[in-house]
Image (cartoon, rainbow, N blue to C red):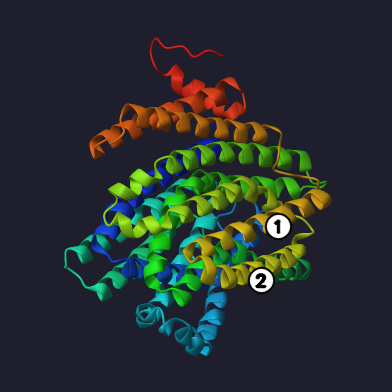
């Protein structure tokens, strides 16, 4: 098994451990011990810090991967590349720190009416943003080394455990709201520190500067690329947070909290894509930066990743949706958060589509046409702002989710069409149609099982409902697995099933 496969599996395991912790935290601690307004506060603080971090990066994550082939050697500092990944984000942080204080009055006036609690804690976004910034920088450095498992563990497991501890301390009145926000800051600070220690002591890299290999042509190309790739931060992190900001400003933190819980549920759909995308992108960069560009290899990677992410993401979405009513019924204070039921579906569809096609759209960043991403991103930004402004007053939190879905689909569709015209590569394949067909079959099976259960037990108790849901979910999942396997939709999926099944003594699986 190659390093990519090993790191992807380890990273995915860390992701799902984090999901388990996040599940307990979100649905049994946050909803039990925090009010929707307090949940909204913690969400918008992190979203604001993420926005600040994304801008401060100045496109470093994308530019580092793009120029990595030019710096790649056997040295511990990659000819000074690691040094520049530290300095450029720091300059960006100082620039946007100045912008924060210049526009501080406008920020405060925007949220004072509906979300005064956020105004009270707005300054805490600065340290959180700084820590998230360098946690991201160190994760990118680890990606260059094809080592994503430990940084993924820190982000998905350690950070969630630290936040869980803060929520429990707050819930049992050990600390007040001020203390909770301080714990939030400290958790992200430790996450950045642990990532740095991992790089220095485990991978033995060096941040020593090296200026002799920075030619005028390379400097010009790097600066131009970084300037344009600053806009990619808007797509990757800023735009997904726009809805929560608009909801906080127009509806209040209570609705932001409901939206946040719905978003937590929907986010499970995209988890498998996180490690795989991080590992594949450096390979794609090498293929497209070759002379001539190896478009065939890039396309093969795109289509394989897109297909597998669509399979896994769609199955997860279906299993979530067929149990959504029971889930809210069992959730502490679930009647309040059930207002976000349709938000879950809309955001889950958004994340499914995005995770299945993003790796294809990112190819533009590694070609000579990268600068055109500026125009697509500006369109995405304007469309998202317009849709949030128009839809939230009409449809409430569902309007915010619809704004995210519509802008995401239109943006990616236009971007992928352009990538096909210019680069002649696409993440789409005929097999993805069969994935969608199998998805509809799974939903039809669930519908029939619901009708059958209603006939057999018209007014079940809560325990009986849970048992029925477990059986129904198991039947739907197994049916989907068999359809994917015998339909031979994905070679990777079939290989994984055979490998897992072969470890069971005395069992055979038909090939």
Q: CA distance from mark 1 to mark 2?
A: 21 Å
Tell me where residue 358 appears, x and y as whole percent. 63, 51
Most foreground residue, 329 or 142: 329
Mark 2 neighbour class, 10 Å CA radius: few under 14, some 14 to 19, many 20 or more: few
As displayed, is residue 502 above or below residue 231? above
Q: Which element carries disc 2, helix, strand or loop?
A: helix
| Disc 1: which residue | 365
Q: Is residue 171 left or right of residue 471?
A: left
In this rendered view, identify the residue nearer to me: 74 or 392.
Answer: 392
Task: Tell me: residue 22, above or below residue 390.
Answer: above
In this view, the residue in front, 181 or 434, is 434
Residue 263 locus on image (x, y percent): 45, 56
Task: Locate the C terminus and report the quarter of the image it occupies.
Answer: top right
**Label placed on residue 382:** 2
**Vertical side of 254 occupied by 469: above or below:** above
Q: Residue at x 54, y 57 (%)?
A: 140
Tell me what residue is drawn at x 34 percent, y 46 percent. 327
Q: In terms of secondary structure, where does tag 1 sit? A: helix
């Amino acid at each position: 098994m190659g390093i990519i496969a090993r790191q992807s599996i380890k990273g995915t395991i860390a992701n799902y451990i984090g999901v388990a912790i996040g599940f307990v935290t979100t649905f049994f601690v946050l909803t039990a011990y925090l009010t929707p307004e307090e949940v909204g506060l913690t969400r918008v603080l992190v979203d604001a810090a993420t926005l600040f971090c994304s801008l401060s990066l100045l496109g470093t994550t994308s530019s580092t991967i793009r120029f990595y082939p030019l710096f790649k050697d056997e040295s511990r500092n990659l000819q000074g590349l690691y040094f520049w990944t530290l300095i450029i984000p720091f300059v960006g942080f100082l620039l946007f720190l100045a912008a924060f204080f210049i526009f501080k009055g406008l920020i405060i006036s925007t949220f004072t009416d509906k979300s005064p609690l956020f105004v009270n804690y707005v300054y805490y976004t600065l340290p959180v943003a700084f820590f998230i910034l360098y946690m991201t920088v160190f994760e990118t450095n680890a990606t260059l080394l094809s080592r994503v498992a430990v940084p993924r563990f820190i982000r998905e497991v350690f950070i969630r455990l630290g936040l869980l501890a803060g929520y429990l301390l707050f819930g049992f009145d050990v600390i007040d709201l001020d203390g909770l926000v301080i714990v939030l800051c400290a958790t992200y600070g430790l996450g950045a520190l642990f990532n740095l220690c991992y790089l220095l002591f485990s991978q033995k890299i060096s941040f020593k500067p090296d200026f002799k290999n920075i030619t005028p042509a390379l400097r010009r190309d790097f600066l131009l690329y970084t300037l344009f790739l600053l806009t990619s931060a808007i797509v990757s992190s800023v735009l997904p947070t726009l809805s929560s900001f608009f909801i906080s400003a127009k509806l209040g933190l209570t609705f932001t909290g409901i939206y946040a819980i719905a978003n937590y549920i929907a986010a499970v759909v995209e988890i498998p894509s996180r490690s795989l995308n991080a590992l594949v992108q450096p390979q794609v960069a090498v293929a497209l930066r070759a002379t001539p560009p190896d478009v065939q290899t890039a396309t093969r990677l795109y289509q394989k990743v897109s297909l597998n992410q669509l399979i896994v993401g769609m199955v997860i979405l279906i299993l979530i949706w067929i149990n959504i009513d029971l889930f809210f019924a069992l959730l502490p204070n679930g009647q309040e958060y059930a207002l976000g039921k349709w938000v879950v579906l809309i955001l889950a569809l958004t994340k499914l589509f995005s995770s299945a096609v993003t790796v294809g759209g990112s190819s533009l960043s590694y070609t000579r046409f990268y600068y055109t991403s500026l125009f697509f991103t500006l369109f995405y930004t304007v469309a998202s702002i317009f849709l949030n402004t128009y839809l939230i007053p009409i449809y409430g939190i569902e309007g915010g989710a619809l704004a995210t879905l519509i802008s995401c689909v239109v943006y990616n569709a236009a971007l992928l069409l352009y990538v096909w015209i210019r680069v002649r590569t696409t993440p789409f394949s005929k097999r993805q149609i069969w994935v969608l067909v199998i998805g509809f079959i799974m939903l039809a099976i669930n519908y029939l099982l619901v009708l059958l259960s209603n006939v057999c037990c018209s007014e079940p108790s809560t325990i009986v409902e849970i048992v029925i849901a477990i059986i129904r979910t198991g039947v739907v999942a197994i049916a989907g697995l068999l359809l994917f396997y015998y339909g031979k939709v994905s070679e990777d999926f079939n290989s994984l099933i055979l490998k897992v099944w072969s470890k069971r003594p005395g069992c055979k699986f038909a090939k």
